[in-house]
Image: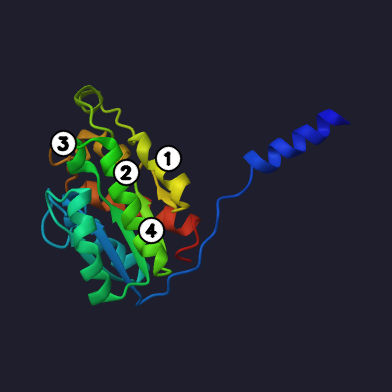
Amino acid sequence: MKFWIGFLVICFVGCSAPEKHSVIPAGAKVLVLGDSLSYGTGAALDEDYPTLLAKTTGWNMINAGIPGNTSAEGLARLPALLEEHQPALLVLELGGNDFLQHVPNVQTVANLKQIIYLAQTKKLPVILVAIPELSVFSAAVGNLSDHPMYEALAEDTKAPLIAEVFSAVLSQEALRADQVHPNAAGYREVSVQMYEKLQALDFVK
């Protein structure tokens, strides 16, 4: 009897379905706060993933991706962006330039937490996008994985995480413009995988 009770408790805790969220309707403003991966470096104009997601979701995507931006710079930009656009959803894609500039992880995490908490205090849902851990060897052998700080950050802030998208795409040479940016085909794959994950989270039908 004790065995079955223990088994049911474990299954309830470990086998529960992913948390669901409110649908963001077509036409709603969605702000993407990011760096070159959101801007679309490595592909032509309008081949970035926010533009592609706008076509599949029907959202009014506001691409606030700036190449070279760090988490600290994104945090500094956010209040004015929220005031100007009044979005219904924030997509947060930052951290890659912190890794490249060797910003201490504790500072990067603190900045990203402030971004998430600032949005949450305004009742604005936030989706966190994971970025690959910086590894020359993993990039060379095509086996990138997300930096572990993103999963921990998502757990701490209760922000839904879009994981293993950029890692999967940038692990494939045919989908890369360079070691850290997708090409046009890569951004298309990013948008497809993100859309599927947004559906699983119930942000889109």
Which x, y percent locates residue 138? 26, 25
Q: What type is the residue that disc 3 sits on? A: Leu
**Secondary element at tag 3:** helix
Task: Identify the element where label 2 is drawn.
Answer: helix
Q: CA distance from mark 2 to mark 4?
A: 12 Å
What amino acid is found at the position of numbered circle 2 in the picture?
A: Val
In the image, 95: left or right of 128? left
Distance from disc 1 to disc 2, alpha carbons, whole Å, reads: 9 Å
Question: At which x and y percent is residue 14?
Answer: 63, 39
Q: Amino acid at mark 1?
A: Ala
Q: Quadrant of the N terminus?
A: top right
Above or below 52: residue 153: above
Helix, strand or loop for disc 4: helix
Asked if labels 2 and 1 touch by Cβ distance under 8 angstroms, the answer is: yes
Please tell me the numbered disc located at residue 152: 1
Q: Which residue is mark 3?
A: 100
Q: Which residue is mark 4?
A: 117
Q: Check contact, mark 1 vs mark 4: CB within 8 A.
A: no
N-terminal label among 4 and 3:
3
Q: Nearer the viewer, residue 128 or 110?
A: 110
Q: Mark 1 vs mark 2: which is more N-terminal?
A: 2
Marks 2 and 4 close (CB-CB < 8 Å) = no
Q: Which residue is mark 2?
A: 109
Q: Position of residue 73 (x, y in %)?
A: 17, 54
Q: Identify the residue at image location x=48%, y=66%.
A: 205
